[in-house]
Amino acid sequence: MDFDTLHALGKTELHCHLDGSLSLSCIRQLAKMINRPLPASDDTLRQLVQAPADSENLADYLKTFDFVAPLLQTKKALQLAAFDVVAQAAEENVRYIEIRFAPAFSISGGLSLSEATEAVIEGLHQAMTKFDIVAKALVCGMRQLPNADNQAMFRANAALLGNGLVGGDFAGNEADFPTSVCAPAIKTAQALGVPLTFHAGECHCPQNIAEAIFLGIPRIGHATACFDQPDLIQKIVQTHTTIELCLTSNLQTKAARSLDKFPYQALKAAGAAITINTDNRTVSNTTLTHEYELYQTYFKTTAADFLAFNLNGINAAFISEPAKQTLRNRLQQDYAAFL
Ligand SMILES: O=c1[nH]cnc2c1ncn2[C@@H]1O[C@H](CO)[C@@H](O)[C@H]1O
Ligand SMILES: [Zn+2]
C-alpha cells in the first residue's frame, strides 16, 4: 500500500503520550501564553523537542520531555494540548485513541492532580465534537516518584473514571526503578478499580514484563525485552496480555538495538495480541501512518494484519463493550476495500 492508502486506513492507538506529541504550532501557542521565547525557525525548535538522534538509552530520551513540561501547567494549556493531539490523530484517520499524561508533572502552577486531568478531558471532549474520533485519557504514575506520590495521584483521579478518564499507566525511569519497586502503587490503583497498562521491557529487563503480568496488568507498553524469551512470550499469549508496540521509539531508546531485537515477529508468530503505536509523535518524530509504513517495509505487514492489530486495540481498550462493538463495525467497514 502506498503512503496515501496507509494514511486513509482506519486506525486505533492505545499508547500515545500527551507531552511527547504536541505539534510545533501548539508548542508555540503554549509558549506564548507564558511569554517564553522560542527559536523563530521550526527546524531549530524541532531539534529541541525531538529526542536526539544519538540517544543512548531511555534516560537520555526522557530528558527531551523537560522542554515542554513548563508549558503544561494551566487548565487552558492542558486543554489546548489534548485538543491538539486528538486533532493530529483524527487527521490520520485514527478512530479511537487513549492519550496518557502524568498529572504529577502538571501541578507546579497550582493545579491539583485531578484538575490537571479534568483539563485534559475537557480538551478531549472539545476535539471529539469537532473530529470523527473517540478519545480517552490515561493517567501515568511515574516509576521514579515515591509510591506515596503515585498512590495520591490515583486516589485523586479515581473519581474521574468513566468520564473521559479510562485508566492508568506507569511510565518513566525503568532502568533504576524496576516493576517490583512500584508494586505498592500498582496495588493501590488496582484496588481503586483503575484499569492499568504498564511500561515494561524497555531497558533489556524481561523480568519487569513478567512481574507486571504476574501483578495482573492486562496491557504492557513496549515489552521489547521479550523478543528472545519464548517462555515469557508464551505467558503473554496464555494470559491474553495485549502488547503496545512502539517501533521508532524503541530504536531511539535502544530498547531494540536493531530490527531483529524488536519483538514484533516473535509475538506475531506466537499469536500474541499486538498493537501498533507512536509512543510520542513529536519526541520520536513519527505518526501512526509512518509507523504503519515502517512495518510494511520491514516486516511485510498486510492490510489484514493491520485490521487484526486494530481489533486487538479495541478489545484491550478501557471502554464499554457496546462502545467497542461500534468501533469494530467501523473498522471492518474501513478495511473492507483492502482485504
Ligand atoms: O517510552 C517511554 N518510556 C517511559 N516513559 C516514557 C516514555 N515516553 C514518555 N514517557 C514519560 O511519560 C511521561 C508522561 O507522558 C513523560 O513526561 C515521560 O517522562
Ligand atoms: Zn510510552
Image: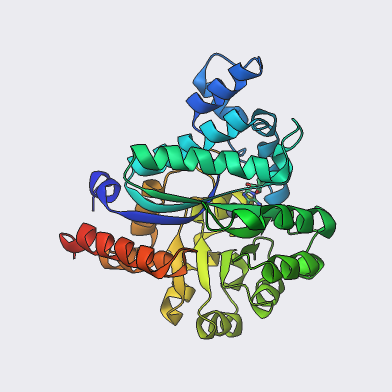
Is residue 9 visible in the rendered structure shown here?
Answer: yes
* Residue for point 22% across, 60% down: 335
Residue 33, image quadrant: top right
Task: Locate residue 249, reporting x and y percent.
Answer: 55, 51
> Given the current orientation, which residue lies at the most extreme front position?
159
Q: Taking 27 as reference, is 309 above or below it?
A: below
x and y percent of residue 70 in the render? 70, 29
Task: Classify 42 as above or below 299.
Answer: above
Classify residue 221 as left or right of residue 305.
right
In percent of width and height, residue 200 lies at: 65, 65
Q: Is residue 199 left or right of residue 258?
A: right
* Percent position of residue 40, x then y: 55, 13
**Closest to the observer: 41 or 308?**
308
Residue nearer the viewer, 119 or 140: 119
Q: Image quadrant for the C terminus?
A: bottom left
Q: Nearer the viewer, residue 252 or 145?
A: 145
